[in-house]
Image (cartoon, rainbow, N blue to C red):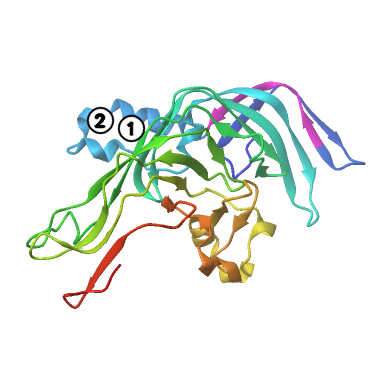
Amino acid sequence: MAEETKPLIFQLNSIAWNPSSAEFLFGGGTVYFTMENALDALDSHVADFLDPDMAIKRSNLAYYREVNSLLDPPEISIGANNEALLRTKVRLGATAMTTHFPYDINQEWVSSSDVQIIDDLIDSSTSLMIAPTSTTVPYARDCNENNPCAGSVGPAIMECYATSPTTISRDGGLRTQVDLTNVSNVRWGTRENNTFAQETDPFSNGAVYIAGHFIRGDQSAFNVLDQRGPAEILLSGMAINSANAMERPSQANYADGFADYAGLNLRVGADYNLYSDSIVGGTPSGP
């Protein structure tokens, strides 16, 4: 059995249909990652590529790759709009991934983790990725690194040390709280004299958020006829104070920027005391 919004295939021992409750109940069995064979094939042919990086499959759902146990057999029930809703729980082994949005973040977890799915949504209160390692987040400071301009200093790397387990959003996104004490000033907009147009003091902490990979239909804030599902999945924010709440691009509060969005979200301290400087038209305009 497969449920199309999750990258899982279930091989089950039995199936029972209860017409009165409109439920399908399944016996125990095993679970597999849908892309397992394809990624194994890529890994085994790295030497055949002109560029080894061609074997990297950047994907925001690749953390399912090490799924190894079916903890709760699947149940399928009917929703308010007559849609099928999945309930199950699976265990993932130690795993790693390279993301596609934000692009090219490498994240790793060195312990087993459980993912609980209730009515097609990840239950963020019980689903955690355990023992995340430090991760690096690159950011551009000037022109395209593949086509550098004169005076370019290239991208910078921010080393982020995980301070807690990774929380999984209801859309399948991943948020890891990080310590940034080893990160120097944030600078971008290289100028001809090796200074920067924009610069801030170092930040002490933040959160890395990797966008989700699905959205349940009734969770969308867009009209279905707009066909903006992919954009909504990638651009949604995960609420800071509620693991199960999401902020959608079409909502009025989206412009306030008070959630965690795809990439590295930087945090100021309680006193908001952070020095920054901005040079506009050659003239300093800060702090």
Is 65 on the left-hand or right-hand side of 148? right
Kindly indicate the quadrant of the structure image that contains residue 169. top right
Q: Which residues are magenta?
A: 24-33
Circle 1 SS class: helix
Q: Is residue 72 magenta?
A: no
Q: Is residue 32 magenta?
A: yes
* Vertical order, 89 against 54 (above or below): above
User: Outermost residue toward the bottom?
Assistant: 281
User: Outermost residue toward the right?
Assistant: 20
Where's residue 285, x and y in %?
A: 26, 74
Where's residue 182, x and y in %?
A: 30, 39
Residue in view at x 24 percent, y 38 percent: 53
What's the CA distance linking mark 2 and mark 1? 6 Å
Amino acid at pointer 1: Leu
Residue in view at x 49 percent, y 22 percent: 111
The secondary structure making up most of the magenta span is: strand
Residue 125: image tag: none
Residue 46: image tag: 2
Amino acid at pointer 2: Val
Front position in the image: 215 or 2? 215
Where's residue 31, x and y in %?
A: 60, 26
Kindly indicate the quadrant of the structure image that contains residue 142. bottom left
